[in-house]
Image (tube, rainbow, N blue to C red):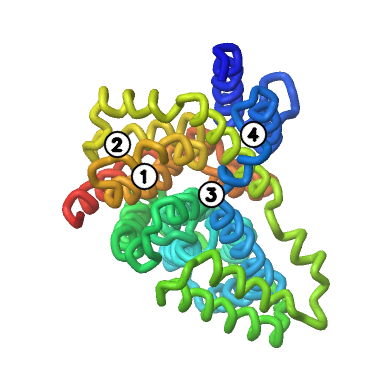
Amino acid sequence: MSELAILGTYSVFVASYVVFALGKFPGMKIDRPGAAIIGAVLMFAFGAVRAQDALHFIHFGTVVLLFSMMLVVAHLHLAGFFDWITELVVTRLKPHHLLPTVIFLSGLLSAFFVNDIICLVMVPFVLKVAGRMGIKPVPYLLAVATASNIGSTATITGNPQNILIGSFSSIGYRDFLWHLGPVAVVGLFLNWLVLWWLYFRGEVHDVRTGGAVEPLNVEHAALLKAGIVTLLVLAGFLAGFPPPLVAAVGAAVLLITRTRDPHLVYEEVDWGLLVFFIGLFLIVGGAENAGLTERLLGFGEHFNLQRLSVFTIVTAILSNLVSNVPAVMLLKSLVSRFANPHSAWLVLAMASTLAGNLTITGSVANIIVVERASREAKISFLDYFRIGLPVTLLTLLFGWLWLSWIR
């Protein structure tokens, strides 16, 4: 590549990451997926990525796993699984049980399904329950956001960045769960402690009589099929079969139907996120061709990133600057050349996920919660930061100590 082409490639890379950090291009309506598409096209224009090599940079296992899990969760959602869980919980809850229920339900579901999707269905649940109990929903909405991030740390399928790491690192599903499952469990208890201390310490709930119970919209046959397939998919993950293949088979089986309109399923898919991933693969691939990897390696040696404590801090900071998925894509070239890449991959997954709890813009899950609830409950930056800062520091500290000990 010529010097001009290298300069252009680096400019595209930096500009793309600025948009990833800000959420949109200043003064224009270019969002993250749009920036990923534009950046990828410019990588071709500057010659950093050649057409015949493009498929080499796109990790199809990651895209297939993410897409397939979206289809599986879409079928569960449309069949009424989450409505059924909501009603099951609502009819048995007392007000002082709501906080731990929201935390551990969000965390458990996010551990096995993509956390962004779980936030989409948990926000209406919280608003409905809080309204029927006559309590303020904000603490419980904060619990959904923070717990979904923490719970998603546990497995490869918990969030988009873990899906990336699982694909690049070849770490098995059970191995990943064994190392990061305890971080998620302890993190959920820490989250409960902080929320209780900040919002409920010494308070007594003032509860009104609940309203009429809404009719439950559950398609029993579809729910049974979706539930069985989901359990088989999770069993396949734990048995050690390739997650993309297992998830794809499960999604394909669910698409075999005589009653479900497939367009309803496709509407549940986050196509923008899939496009974002593909564009990001090409942007980072082009930057690597232009020498980014070697520069990053020099940076890593200078700051001794192979120390897990340093790598945890750098990952957490970078994840809040540019968002966790772009941060993982940027750091993946470093990790593969560490002396102990297994531990480094796990630290990258842990830190990039837990760091997302620091601010509203730290993860897509947080933004989903705030935006979905905005009509009924306003969550300001300071409202979130008040809980996000202690939760992030405590969970990152425990995650680092645990991985330093268990490796």
Count of number-bearing discs = 4
- Residue 365 appears anywhere in the view: yes
Cα distance, mark 2 to mark 1? 8 Å
Compared with residue 364, is residue 13 higher up or lower down, i.e. above or below?
above
Mark 3 nearby-residue class (10 Å; few <14, some 14–19, many ≥20): many
Which amino acid, by three-letter code, is at mark 1?
Leu
Q: Residues within 10 Å of mark 4 (few under 14, many from 20)?
A: few
The x, y position of residue 65, in whole percent, is 57, 61
The image position of residue 167, as x and y in percent, is 47, 55
Q: Cα distance, mark 2 to mark 3?
A: 33 Å
Q: Earlier in the sequence, mark 2 or mark 3?
A: 3
Amino acid type of the residue tagged 2 in the rendering: Phe
Callouts 2 and 3 close, C-beta under 8 Å: no
Residue marked by disc 2 = 311
Residue annotated with mark 4: 50
Tag 4: residue type? Arg
Residue tagged 1 = 348
